[in-house]
Image (spheres, grey):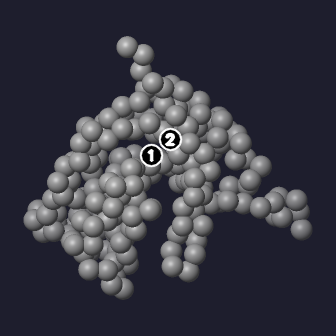
Amino acid sequence: MSESEIRPEKRLFIAIDIPGHIKDNVCDYTKNLFKENGYIKLVSAPNIHITLKFLGNVNIDKIEKIKKAIKETADKFNRFKYEINGKINAFPSPGNARVIFLEIGNGGEEISGIYKQLEDDLERIKIRKEKREFSPHITIARLKDKKNIENLIKEYKMNKIEGLDCLNITLFESQLKTHGAEYSIIGEFGLKEEII
């Protein structure tokens, strides 16, 4: 067995975390909207966040380099406010949905800017850029089979949540358990405080 095969790995992703009470609000809303069954899996409150990049299984030797790259990104951006605009949408499309999400309204451009910079900083440590276009969102449910949810999108909308502070970029570990994924924070990297 080679040395690379025996090195332990962690399953990692980078995200913007959301305040706990907002996670609870989003979770309560989705529980009222969808009945969880064999076809739909709701995202539990602790696991609600805005994903910037899923890294997958990473050798623990590389984690410090990843942290350094995230810090470099965080150091280039001021803190800002964003909103969850309440609109429901789906990937790959509402007519053919596999992932149901809430859209980000104001502040979405800033989050996209962080994502683009993060991709550049991670590429320097040989982490490949994503091919698909980035769209900031909060995943609220996953479907086992593709489904048309166009009517649901027209009919329902969550109340807008404004004035959320984006203060950090967070590196999470995802551990797959029998009841689903459990997330723990590996590192938090503060955005700059704007000096007025």
Q: Quadrant of the N terminus?
A: bottom right
Q: Which residue lies under the disc numbered 2? A: 169
- Assign a secondary structure to mark 2: strand
As drawn, 120 above or below 133: above
State whether residue 164 appears in this view: yes
At label 1, which amino acid type do we have?
Ile
Q: Is residue 162 above or below residue 45?
A: above
Asked if labels 1 and 2 touch by Cβ distance under 8 angstroms, the answer is: yes
Q: Find residue 160 and report its horizontal and vertical position in percent.
A: 19, 49
User: What quarter of the picture does the C terminus occupy?
Assistant: top left
Identify which residue is drawn at 37% across, 75% down. 41
Give the percent coordinates (x, y) of residue 152.
Answer: 16, 68
Q: Nearer the viewer, residue 147 or 83?
A: 83
The residue lying furthest to the left in this view is 155
Tell me if 128 is positioned left or right of 37 in this view. Answer: right
Residue that numbered label 1 is attached to: 16
Q: Residue at x 33, y 84 (%)?
A: 37
Q: In the image, what residue occupies the spot 15% across and 59% down?
A: 157
